[in-house]
Image (cartoon, grey):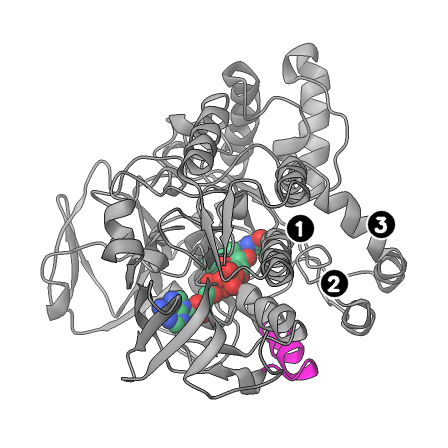
């Protein structure tokens, strides 16, 4: 390996694209191996998701004490989370702290977007170009570009004529946005919409919520962390982290749960009520069969429908807010503060876009097929081109000049979500085909970065200069990912997990649903077998 340290060179060992949780840890790990590393980040600072998504109400929905790095015991000891679910500013401060504490900032070139990456077989290097006109070469290209980083905007005829302000939750401005006295629209009721709507509603003169698909949401019951409970968990971080890493979900330690169908109606009600009162996504995991049995899932869905009915005073609005055409949990289960109760406010209107779609925008506002809505501001909370969007947004070409977009024409093909055949020395962190968005992402990120770093170390040990996935190994993994998905209810939903939110995107179940602990074990076994499925060549 080459000489250690920071570089602003144009020829490096590894380029790491993205400076969110994944890119930051990848820089840390690869630099520690004395590789010359260069980070590239389109934004002007670190943070990734937590840099871009500054909308009112933005916070994690995995508990803070779990949603944080485990690679440094010193970092674990010194950082004190203040709330059960940390807010966006707190998570951003954490990531800034990590970057400064481990002196990683000088390794990153900000305001620099990678636009082109071509594999040069003759030199065994990636030839890279950025939107700032720079050229770089690197042996390894690590795409830490994020699963939810490529925003999606619906095409609304005439939107360019709108005279008010337009915001995107995923590109929220850094300066304070004040909606006081305004007529505001929020379009989209996924996770970001559900987090922001209650906060925006408290500021505006009037808020109109445009909903295409209602989503299931559970209360966060967010609160300051109890200092003693926090201290006790901090003292027990290593076993706690281990229990998460080895668990099915990585969101909470595994525990035995009964089948919903083995319980009486009263037992189910008690169990669901306890999970609801505790808050967060526990509800989905308080029975063993929520994502594999439709009858079991139906009992949970009815329970949430009842909670919506008892919270929302207007019965017609309550019905409009109840998801009915997909099983609970097969679209991301949202975690909210006062979401359903917000529809009791006199300044909030809910518009059902399935009944009355948006037809156009004008200088004054939006028009649906039924009515006109004069507006001062429009907020798009319309989600992302998930998992493949950021990777396909640039021109990546592998062996023989083959474009990644062509190789993935019918859907992404990866081995473990970490690499794809025909693209030597190209690695993805939490790529399609890995647990990624179904997991606690920080745990999955650390696992993927460690796998890649160990693979590079093995290459060094063997004197290999390229690592490439063998096609049969990739084919086997693609089939396995699809087969496991078929044993669940996930394919029944038109979700972004299936690519259904992006017109023309192939319908393929993108993440791996076989369990985080099981995935980790498979990666471990593959590494122990000398990285079976990879060709390591001199
Ligand atoms: P990101 O944080 O998305 O960072 C990717 C970075 O790459 C971005 O900064 C982007 O600018 C940059 N980039 C992309 N392409 C290029 C390019 N071509 N050139 C240069 N730079 C590029 N996950 C959880 O586990 N728990 C949660 O509670 C949770 N809450 C979330 C809330 C919101 C609002 C969102 C949007 C996501 C949430 N997630 C959550 C998922 C979240 O994305 C991950 O947890 C994690 O932050 C991803 O980190 P990352 O580094 O992989 O990607």
State the separation of the CA atoms marked 3 and 1.
26 Å
Q: Which residue occupies 33% across, 52% down?
A: 385
State the separation of the CA atoms marked 3 and 2.
24 Å
Say how many tags the image has. Answer: 3
The residue tagged 1 is 221
Q: In terms of image quadrants, where is residue 246?
A: top right
Q: Which residue occupies 16% across, 74% down?
A: 163
Per the rendering, the mark at residue 239 is 3
Could you say whether the residue bearing mark 1 is in a helix, strand or loop?
Answer: loop
Image location (x, y in percent) of residue 325: 37, 26
Secondary structure character of the magenta stretch overall: helix
Q: Does the residue labelled 2 lie within 8 Å of ligand 1?
A: no
The residue tagged 2 is 224
Of mark 3 and mark 1, the one earlier in the sequence is 1
Q: Which residues are the magenta region?
A: 92-104
The one nearer the camera, 530 or 526, is 530
Q: Nearer the viewer, mark 3 or mark 1?
A: 3
């Amino acid at each position: 390996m080459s000489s250690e340290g920071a570089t602003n060179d144009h020829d490096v060992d590894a380029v790491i694209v993205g400076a969110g949780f994944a890119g930051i840890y990848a820089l840390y790990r690869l630099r520690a191996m004395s590789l010359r590393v260069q980070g590239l980040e389109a934004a002007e600072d670190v943070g990734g998701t937590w840099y871009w998504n500054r909308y009112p109400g933005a916070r994690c929905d995995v508990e803070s004490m779990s949603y944080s790095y485990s690679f440094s015991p010193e970092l674990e000891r010194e950082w004190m989370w203040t709330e059960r679910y940390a807010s966006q500013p707190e998570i951003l401060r954490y990531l800034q702290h990590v970057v400064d504490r481990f002196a990683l900032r000088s390794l990153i070139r900000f305001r620099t977007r990678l636009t082109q990456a071509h594999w040069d077989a003759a030199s065994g290097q990636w030839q890279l170009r950025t939107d700032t006109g720079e050229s770089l070469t690197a042996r390894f290209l690590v795409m830490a570009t994020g699963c939810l980083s490529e925003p999606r905007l619906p095409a609304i005829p005439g939107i360019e004529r709108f005279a008010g302000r337009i915001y995107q939750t995923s590109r929220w401005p850094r300066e304070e946005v004040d909606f006081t006295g305004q007529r505001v629209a929020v379009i989209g009721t996924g996770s970001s919409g559900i987090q922001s709507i209650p906060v925006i509603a408290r500021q505006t003169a009037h808020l109109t919520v445009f909903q295409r698909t209602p989503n299931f949401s559970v209360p966060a019951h967010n609160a300051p962390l109890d200092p003693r409970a926090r201290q006790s968990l901090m003292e027990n971080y290593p076993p706690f982290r281990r229990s998460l890493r080895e668990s099915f979900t990585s969101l909470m330690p595994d525990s035995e749960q009964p089948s919903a169908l083995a319980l009486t109606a009263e037992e189910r009600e008690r169990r669901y009520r306890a999970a609801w009162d505790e808050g967060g996504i526990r509800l989905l995991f308080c029975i063993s069969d929520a994502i594999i049995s439709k009858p079991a899932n139906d009992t949970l869905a009815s329970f949430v429908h009842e909670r919506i009915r008892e919270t929302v005073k207007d019965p017609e609005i309550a019905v409009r807010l109840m998801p009915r055409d997909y099983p609970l949990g097969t679209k991301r289960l949202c975690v909210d503060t006062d979401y359903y109760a917000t529809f009791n406010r006199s300044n909030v209107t809910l518009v059902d876009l399935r009944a009355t779609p948006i037809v156009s925008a004008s200088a004054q506002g939006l028009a649906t097929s039924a009515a006109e809505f004069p507006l001062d501001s429009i907020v798009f909370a319309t989600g992302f081109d998930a998992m493949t969007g950021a990777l396909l947004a640039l021109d990546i070409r592998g062996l023989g000049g083959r474009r990644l977009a062509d190789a993935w024409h019918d859907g992404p093909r990866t081995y473990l979500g970490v690499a794809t055949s025909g693209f030597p020395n190209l690695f993805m962190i939490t790529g399609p085909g890995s647990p990624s968005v179904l997991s606690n992402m920080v745990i999955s990120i650390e696992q993927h970065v460690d796998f890649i770093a160990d693979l590079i170390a093995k290459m060094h040990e063997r004197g290999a200069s390229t690592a490439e996935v063998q096609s049969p190994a990739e084919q086997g993994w693609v089939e396995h990912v699809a087969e496991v998905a078929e044993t669940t209810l996930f394919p029944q939903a038109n979700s972004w997990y299936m690519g259904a939110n992006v017109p023309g995107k192939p319908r393929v179940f993108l993440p791996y649903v076989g369990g985080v602990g099981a995935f980790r074990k498979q990666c471990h076994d593959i590494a122990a077998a000398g990285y079976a499925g990879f060709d390591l060549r001199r």
